[in-house]
Image: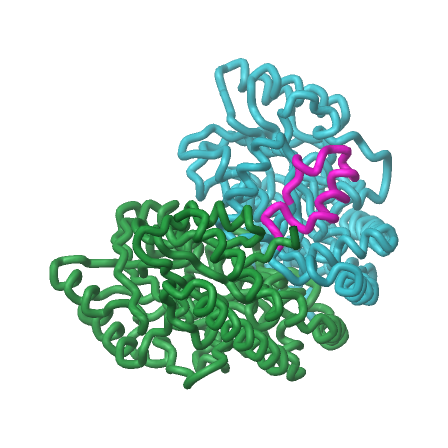
Chain colours: A green, B cyan
């Protein structure tokens, strides 16, 4: 058999990482700021990168803490906000690791459906009217993982109003913001927030590379100070060497070029994926994403995606079954990550998948 | 006033960090293994570095997990072993951040005195005979932080026997192992352990640099697997970019040269510090360390080191009061970190300290 084609992991392929630019960025970091690049630093992160992030999002540095990847940021935030039995709104489907992090803290999960234009705000509003009082709502606004959909501007406004009315925090989990390859960028919830309702997380994993494990959290200064204190007690400081490298990568213009490279590749991959799905799995329904890494496909009633996932592996293609991304349901769905599959491999991957689906009927 | 002289933070000065070697190591990492250097990896760490560490300590890779600094390793370990009210043996004095980490998990702390040859094993044995049943004993065997003393080989053997008899884990916290500048290297507790009693932690902060935030934990494979799972759930993977850099730094011989540089500088600094203390604070008692970063000085009964610390700051010298390193006591003691103070600054620093002591009498 040919090599396995993997639509399973949300990671970039090496050809869209600027390895040479990284080498230069680390050299520049060590030339220009050897002391802060090599020493402990403090838990808020490498100071110039923190300032760069603050400027990008138009907030003060005091509102920013840079962390060892954005999942670590999630963990610190959940430790602050989620106690056993705290009601938490999650999207259905949503990122499996977020569900796990919330479950590990014994949060009480309230899934709200995701539509082709983002979370169903009517459903959420009804639940709130019926008495639900969440401490937090976890929202992936752009090119949602796994659904691939984007929250409209109107829904963003309504969500903020609900957070205000019912007194909860919106956790805007936005790692894909900068890799929109089609359509207009929408304002972040953070940028529309005037009342400290939003805590925002993002990452450099999709724009620079995941190996640098650098993410960040933006929020009210008092909350960020608490997170920074917890971070001090956990690891003293995040990786200054990596953060100084990212700062130089951004400053030199390599970041902008890297984002352009990533977007161009992702767009070509998703277009091929959509075309191949239409050709080989004509009954599948899906929303073609405008950015990000993931396409969510519903193979229709009666298809058991746990079986499909196993059969697909026999055919030499890896996919993730939909049930991993929901508290319940998702049996007929799959998540396809196109971030790591070269364009010329995608059609073959979908052919294999179609064979697997056929085999499980 | 002249610039402040800081004996407070256990960090190396920039002149003993091989900045050029780091630049070359990152370049080599990106040239030789660009994929694994830039991608997520898994929570056990960058595979070649994990293997390098396993070989160094003569264990299997399955016994090693590489983490974002060794304090993060401590945190993962404590999460596994320490529940509210778990009895834990700590050294008196000991590293303040360890005390904090254990207190945050509501461990029940049992301090055992540290003598000039390490923890008082007689005292520990008596406490065990009297009924103490710790889940863990935290031991810094080499050039202890803050006491600067080293546990003898005979005491190491006795400690292991007690762990066996009374069924507890020894957490051997050994970041200074490789920076012994005098005397014979002693066998680690880990290397003498035949029964899975020892969990060992170390770090590259003292031998390469702290900014790379890379440490590791060695222990029984089942425990390491649990830590790795917790690490996956916390941050997916530690920093592959940093770990790949360290691997190349080690492979090229730069690590060996860096350790030689560090040891030479530390020895000169500690010799000057001891001479200056004898000259300017003749009543002070201390053990001159054979390695590491710290010298612990007892200024004698009646001296209040909280006052001395404040007065010292007025004189332009930073020190840390002994009370930070003990559950109770330590009032007449200070910790002096000589790792970041150039030899030609040390005498002036001690002169200022002596003035401060005088001012508080």
For the residue pair A56 and B128, the one nearer the viewer reads as: A56
For the record, the magenta segment spans B41-65
Is residue B59 on the magenta stretch? yes
Q: Which residue shows up at 47% across the image and 49% down it? A: A309
Q: Is residue B256 visible?
A: yes
Task: Tell me residue A334's x, y (percent).
Answer: 42, 57
How many numbered callouts?
0
B135 and B291: which one is in front? B135
**Does residue B78 sit above or below A50 in this rendering?**
above
Q: Is residue B275 left or right of residue A83?
A: right
Q: Judge from the rendering whether residue B345 lies leftward or rightward of residue A137; answer left or right.
A: right
Residue at x-position 31% and y-position 67%: A170
Quarter of the rendering containing residue A307: top left
In the rendered view, does A93 fall on the left or right side of B5? left
| Residue B168 position in % (x across, y down) | 56, 23
Q: Residue furthest bottom?
A: A184
């Amino acid at each position: 058999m040919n090599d396995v084609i993997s639509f399973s992991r949300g990671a970039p392929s090496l050809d869209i990482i600027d390895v040479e630019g990284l080498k230069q960025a680390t050299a520049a970091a060590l030339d220009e700021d050897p002391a802060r690049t090599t020493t402990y630093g403090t838990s808020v992160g490498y100071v110039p990168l923190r300032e760069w992030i603050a400027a990008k999002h138009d907030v003060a540095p005091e509102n920013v803490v840079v962390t060892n990847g954005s999942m670590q940021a999630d963990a610190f935030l959940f430790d602050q906000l989620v106690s056993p039995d705290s009601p938490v709104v999650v999207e259905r489907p949503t990122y499996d690791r977020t569900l796990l992090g919330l479950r590990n803290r014994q949060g009480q999960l309230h899934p709200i459906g995701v539509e082709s234009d983002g979370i169903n705000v009517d459903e959420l509003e009804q639940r709130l009217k019926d008495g639900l009082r969440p401490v937090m709502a976890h929202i992936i606004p752009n090119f949602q993982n796994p659904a691939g959909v984007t929250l409209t501007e109107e829904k963003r406004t309504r969500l903020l109003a609900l957070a205000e009315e019912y007194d909860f925090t919106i956790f805007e989990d936005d790692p894909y913001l900068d890799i929109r390859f089609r359509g207009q960028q929408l304002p972040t919830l953070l940028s529309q927030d005037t009342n400290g309702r939003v805590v925002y997380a993002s990452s450099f994993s999709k724009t620079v590379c995941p190996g640098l494990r650098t993410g960040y959290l933006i929020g009210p200064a008092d909350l960020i100070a608490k997170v920074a204190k917890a971070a001090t007690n956990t690891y003293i400081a995040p990786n200054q060497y990596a953060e100084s490298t990212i700062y130089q990568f951004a400053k030199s213009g390599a970041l902008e070029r890297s984002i352009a490279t990533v977007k161009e590749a992702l767009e070509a991959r998703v277009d091929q994926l959509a075309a191949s799905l239409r050709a080989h799995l004509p009954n599948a329904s899906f929303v073609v994403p405008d950015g990000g890494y993931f396409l969510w496909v519903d193979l229709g009633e009666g298809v058991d995606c746990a079986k499909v996932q196993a059969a697909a592996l026999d055919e030499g293609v890896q996919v993730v079954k939909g049930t991993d991304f929901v508290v319940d349901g998702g049996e007929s769905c799959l998540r396809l990550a196109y971030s790591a599959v070269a364009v010329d491999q995608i059609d073959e991957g979908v052919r294999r998948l179609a064979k697997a689906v056929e085999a499980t009927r």
